[in-house]
Amino acid sequence: DSILDLIVNDGYNAMLENPASDIYQEILRKYPTAKVVLTVRDDPQAFVRSWKTLFDTMVVTEKMFSWNFPSFFGYIPLFTNLKKIRYFMGTTQLGLSPGALTHTWRARGEECDTWLAEQYERHNAHVIQNVPKNQLLVFNVKEGWAPLCEFLEKPMMPENVSFPHSTVNNAASLKRIKTYLLLVVYGWIPVALGLVGCCWYFGRELSIS
């Protein structure tokens, strides 16, 4: 409750993603008239593909430094805190062990796709069963602005404002982010060596002169 109070007192009136989706029942108990938007995919397999792409990207920020993966991301407080949140995901209404939904699913091998699809369907069913129908919108982003604006009782967006799902937070953008992260992981070494070399060279020139 104290964390929710901090969020509200800072002027926010909405939450999204995790950990909000794992504590939605606690939020509803505190704010019983709150509206819930449950975003869904075309089918469970679409969710599985996007989930695997997402966490193949996010794991780059969690690995600790090693000689074959010289990353410092794992020591940055922002990424360590996000890792804690990811281990919390799925531990409430799904009853999973910490990290099962976000990390150890890979150990399931050929069964991981089926297992992830089951968790997706379990979560959706839990929300649909426990949120009052008049406070719930089951929403596929392909539906665009209309159902969302109507549900939230907001003015309809102008026709020239496209819904952002087509260019933001899709598989292609996540793969680009992973590429950028890997460039940082491996790119700082030649940059550092170059700087050391430049310092050595100019220091040598100054000493000769």
Image (tube, helix red, strand yellow):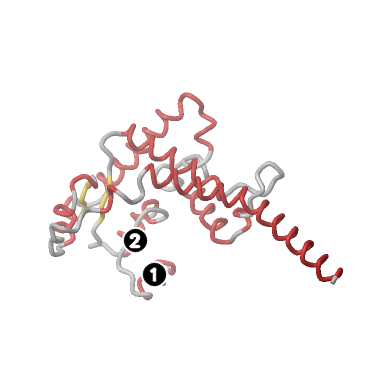
Q: What amino acid type should be assigned to the residue bearing mark 2? A: Met
Residue depicted at 22% across the width and 53% down the height: 163
Coordinates of residue 150 in the picture (x, y in percent): 13, 57
Coordinates of residue 103 in the picture (x, y in percent): 52, 40
Whole-number angstrom distance, CA of label 2 to CA of label 1: 9 Å
Coordinates of residue 200 in the picture (x, y in percent): 79, 62
Q: Which image quarter is the C terminus in? A: bottom right
Crowd class of label 1 (few under 14; some 14 to 19; many from 20; radius 10 Å): some
> Is mark 2 in CB contact (under 8 Å) with mark 1?
yes
Q: Which residue carries the number 2 mark? A: 15
Q: What amino acid type should be assigned to the residue bearing mark 1? A: Ile
Residue depicted at 70% across the width and 60% down the height: 195
Residue at the limit of the structure toward the right, as seen here? 208
> Quadrant location of residue 107?
top right
Coordinates of residue 61 in the picture (x, y in percent): 55, 50
Q: Which residue carries the number 1 mark? A: 7
Q: Is 134 left, or right, of 209 in this rendering?
A: left
Q: Is mark 1 on a helix, strand or loop?
A: helix
Q: Is 188 left, or right, of 11 in this rendering?
A: right
Q: What element carries label 2?
A: loop
Residue depicted at 38% across the width and 56% down the height: 20
